[in-house]
Amino acid sequence: MSEFSQEEKDKIEADFAKVLSYCPKVYTDPVSMAMVRKAFDLANKAHYGSRRKSGEPYIFHPLAVAKIVSGEMGRGVRSIIGSLLHDVVEDTDYTVDDIRNMFDDRIAIIIDGLTKIKSALKTKSSQAENIRKMLLTFSEDARVILIKIADRLHNMRTMDSMAPDRQIAIAEETRMLFVPLAHRMGFNAIKTELDDLCLKYELPNVYNEITIKLKDTERKRQHYLNKFCIPLMIKLENNNIEFDITSRSKSIASIWNKIQ
């Protein structure tokens, strides 16, 4: 266990403030604010001194998961609390009963579900069995699955410090379990990012080649888009029609699938 620097402590508080900024309810409901602050203080205390393989304080991880859940998924107070506490029972001396006593039954159910999923993923059972266990938990509270998807997304975003064999194993598990779950839950942007991250670690040469080609052709592709869109925009404006035109590049994994 090691002490945190003042810079790290300041960043922890700044990250927590960012989590709150995504959830307006905590500013209008004192009870919600108190519960979220209590969860943060508990997580900060429980994980204090622990660090990830990257060397950063472990508390950055539950804070990042809470930011994904509140900011990218648009979830509320209980989901934020569950995100902040999702590793407390698994990694520290606190129990589900402790969580129930400090919060309520619903939060305890969420944390219990997350702990069971983490344990299930450590077993040697088949992937189908892991999915079954996840869906059984899902039937009790959907927030368990949402938080677990966010947890896996942040882990995939921060795998650079892991050994290559571990990266590949996690990427394969993500592709088989979490990509379909994100798709079924309707989080298409997260599903796409997970797909790309899986490709990054499973086929790094392919991932890097497509990334470079996308960057090299960005200006040319934008030229074609402008050539196509500008005449349409002029026609619409001349006819006083309100409009909004957007475009997007195919994801790296999607391009690779098309090539295949």
Image (spheres, rainbow, N blue to C red):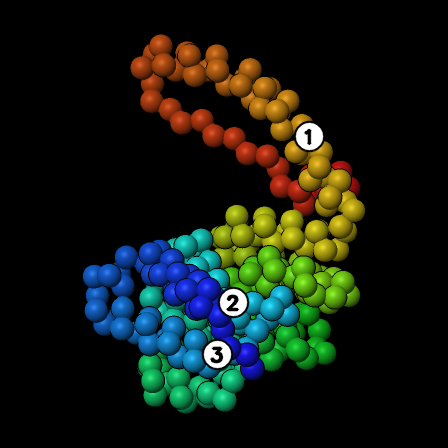
Q: Is residue 52 visible?
A: yes
Sooner in the amino-acid sequence: mark 2 or mark 1: 2
* Left or right for 118, reference 229: right
- Marks 2 and 1: CB-CB under 8 Å? no
Which structural element holds mark 2? helix
Q: Is disc 1 surrounded by few (<14), some (14 to 19) or many (20+) residues within 10 Å?
A: few
Q: Is disc 3 surrounded by few (<14), some (14 to 19) or many (20+) residues within 10 Å?
A: some
Amino acid type for the residue under numbered disc 2:
His
Which structural element holds mark 1? helix
Sooner in the amino-acid sequence: mark 2 or mark 3: 3
Most foreground residue, 22 or 237: 22
Which residue is painted at 68% across and 55% down in the image? 198
| Disc ID at residue 199 | none
Where is 229 relative to 162, above or below?
Answer: above
Which structural element holds mark 3? loop
Q: CA distance from mark 2 to mark 3?
A: 12 Å
* Left or right for 80, reference 176: left
Sooner in the amino-acid sequence: mark 3 or mark 1: 3
Residue at numbered disc 1: 216
Most foreground residue, 259 or 82: 82
Most foreground residue, 206 or 135: 206
Amino acid type for the residue under numbered disc 1:
Asp
| Disc ID at residue 48 | 3
Which residue is painted at 28% across and 57% down in the image? 24
Residue at numbered disc 2: 61
